[in-house]
Image (cartoon, coloured by chain):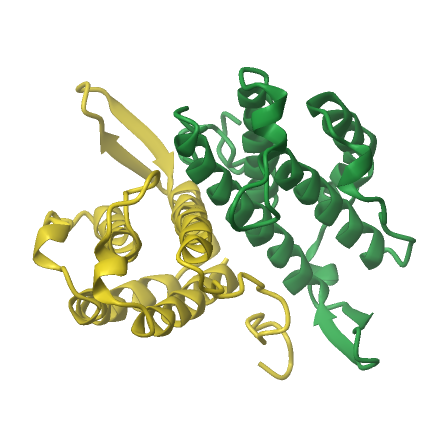
Chain colours: A yellow, B green
């Protein structure tokens, strides 16, 4: 589970570096599908990851709009601001937390009950899914996307050498 | 880990159902990015999942080309043929297998060493990434994609009710 988070953080950083070689207007351009743009997707990933971590802890989550984060540096700053809390939460994960229940109010007034383990896996899948979308848009603007390979990056901390 | 596989299998089945409402020419149309098309992506997901399972077991993997699987039904049939072995392998997963080493010959003649746990997580990320690509192409042809949500689907088998 933690391997998957390390994977997501590494790939996200590589996408930030990829963005450095792309004009801002391409990063901001409205596109079909997903949340509608490259930088907006990275903002959304950062937003959603942190918001879930906050919700699990019973804290207020992030409610700001992408309108205030219209540059690569602003999104990276936001990410840097959120990362310590996210990494602390993930690094302290243990089996006991798997089955804790989140009581999650829904827009229709009902209360969903989600296991924390399910929330954590939802977060993992959420980011990979959106990164897949970036890979299509990268090709549409004629650039090679960041490789999505997880293997061979030494991410599995159960290995003796990582 | 098994939750993530159940998630991928469920979402893949939903994409097959989604494909039923799309003309074959759209499923086969060449597109920018990924492996270049909707049905080809589903074929690739099935191919790669099974191939890794075979490689981990030291068995021959799948070498056929998409050219022979140019219909939704043919891809689903292939998936159905592979699924029993994949599900058996994943359901028998245990902690002891995490650190087993796969010696994986590379095109350059070197031998990569990958922990099985890393291979398994690579397989999970691989499918989610490609499904993210489908979601963009779905919007490009004016159709709502399958939801990528993992949460709220009762996939977490550690819950008492699932």
State the residue at coordinates (24%, 46%). Answer: A30
Q: In which quarter of the image is residue B65?
A: top right
Q: Which x, y percent locates residue B84? A: 80, 33
**Near-viewer residue (A136 or B159):** A136
State the residue at coordinates (52%, 51%). Answer: B33
Q: Which x, y percent locates residue B21? A: 54, 15
**Near-viewer residue (A55 or B120):** B120
Q: Which x, y percent locates residue A11? A: 44, 66
A135 relative position to A75: left or right: right
Q: Which x, y percent locates residue B101? A: 77, 70
Residue farthest toward the top in the current orientation of the protein = B21
Vertical placement of B119 versus B157: above or below? below
**Near-viewer residue (B22 or A103):** B22
State the residue at coordinates (38%, 65%). Answer: A12
Vertical placement of B82 versus B26: above or below? below
B91 relative position to B63: left or right: left
State the residue at coordinates (86%, 51%). Answer: B61
**Near-viewer residue (A139 or B92):** A139
């Amino acid at each position: 589970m933690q391997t998957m988070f390390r994977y997501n953080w590494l790939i996200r950083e590589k996408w930030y570096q990829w963005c450095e070689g792309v004009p801002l207007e391409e990063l901001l351009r409205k596109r079909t599908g997903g949340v509608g743009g490259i930088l907006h997707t990275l903002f959304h990933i950062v937003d959603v990851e942190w918001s879930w971590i906050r919700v699990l802890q019973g804290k207020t989550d992030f409610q700001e709009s992408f309108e205030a984060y219209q540059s690569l540096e602003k999104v990276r700053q936001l990410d840097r601001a959120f990362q310590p809390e996210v990494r602390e939460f993930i690094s302290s994960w243990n089996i006991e937390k798997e089955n804790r229940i989140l009581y999650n109010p829904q827009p229709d007034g009902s209360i969903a009950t989600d296991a924390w383990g399910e929330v954590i896996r939802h977060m993992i899948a959420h980011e990979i899914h959106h990164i897949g979308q970036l890979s299509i848009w990268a090709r549409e603007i004629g650039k090679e996307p960041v490789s999505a390979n997880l293997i061979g990056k030494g991410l599995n901390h159960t290995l003796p050498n990582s």
